[in-house]
Image (cartoon, helix red, strand yellow):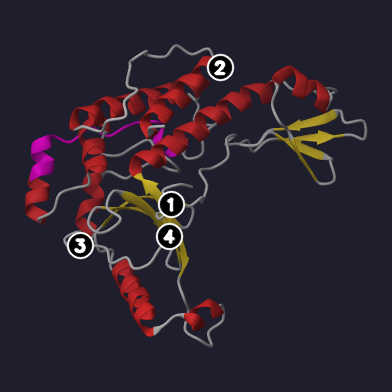
Amino acid sequence: MDLWYKLSFVGRHWLKLLDIDWQNTDWQTTNWMNNEWEKNWQQVKTQVAQLKQLDPDFTLIPGSKFHQYNVAPVLTSQTLSKFENDCGLELPENYRSYLEYFGAGGAGPSMGVDRFQDKISHTDVSKPLNIGFFNGYRHFYLPKGWPGYDPHYDGINEEEMAELEAMDKSLYHGHGMIEIGTLGENSLSLVVNGKLKGNVLAWNGSDLILYGPLEQMYSRWLDLSFRGIQRYNIFKNIEVGMTLEEIDSTYNIAIDRFNEGRVARLSGLSGKLEIDSNNCVKNVIMSYPVVESFGFNSWNYLTKQY
């Protein structure tokens, strides 16, 4: 199933459950042409606006207090072409279309996506990011004898070690990447020059995680956000005295139990239910932000899936 068809289906599905009007624009396409990027990013923009309606106080989605679902003005095709000519490279199609049709930064996973203009001058994108063998996650080695040394590297030959060291150097110098945001202690960078062009990497100096294409990152964020808000609306209706069986049968939603069954939660939410010995809710505890944060699941570059 085409990625953008999935994204549109997810958005419409959750909005329908939430009784929210959806702009019924047909964008179920499997062919990626330049004119389709505009339509798809405009739909993402519409979904971001819907999130703002659902979370007007910026308390539900992690990071929303920072970006407040605002989107920076788009950049013109002429501006982007001038940048490409000056740098001697072509921006990845997904990022160029993002800048031209969605915005130059703003609402997105975690605290949002940094403005293109603020970040582009801080890295050398003319040199490609030097990526060796890499399938989605890598913990960088420490020299033998250092605390935290990974014995895995004992089995790496000289050629592979040289590739790793070249990759280290390229990453530390930020070759071919534009920093677009942060996620916890990790920086989020988009590769604009190199083998992983168009993909987002999380990097904290020791761990490297591949999130996949930019549009896939947005798709996952929107999916988690709408899913979380839908479950939050269910959570709000749970009352003290209700049994877990009653909640399950009423809302047809799975409930996870832990701490020997004394606590229950709806996956995707930070809130929890305290349960008594009769499987009845004795306390409803809500934490803010309500929806769980965008996580660290890496995207396998070799298999093209999470």
Residue assigned mark 4: 135
Residues in magenta?
Answer: 65-81
Instruction: Say left or right for 85 vs 229.
Output: left
- Label at residue 124: 3
Residue 193, how many percent across, how many down? Answer: 22, 56
State how far apart marks 2 and 1 are (Cα): 33 Å
Circle 3 residues within 10 Å: few <14, some 14–19, many ≥20: some
Q: Is residue 287 magenta?
A: no
Rendering coords of residue 102 (x, y %): 27, 31
**Of marks 1 and 3, the one in the foreground:** 1
Query: Which marked residue is nearer to the observer: mark 1 or mark 4?
Result: 1
User: Which residue corresponds to mark 1?
Assistant: 303
The CA distance from mark 1 to mark 3 is 30 Å
Q: Residue at x 84, y 40 (%)?
A: 262
Q: Earlier in the sequence, mark 2 or mark 1?
A: 2
Between disc 1 and disc 3, whose residue precedes? 3
Please tell me which of labels 4 and 3 falls first in the chain. 3
Task: Single out the mark in the foreground, 3 or 2.
Answer: 2
Label annotation for residue 17: 2
**Circle nearer the N terminus (3, 2):** 2
Q: Amino acid at mark 1?
A: Thr
Residue 209 in view: yes
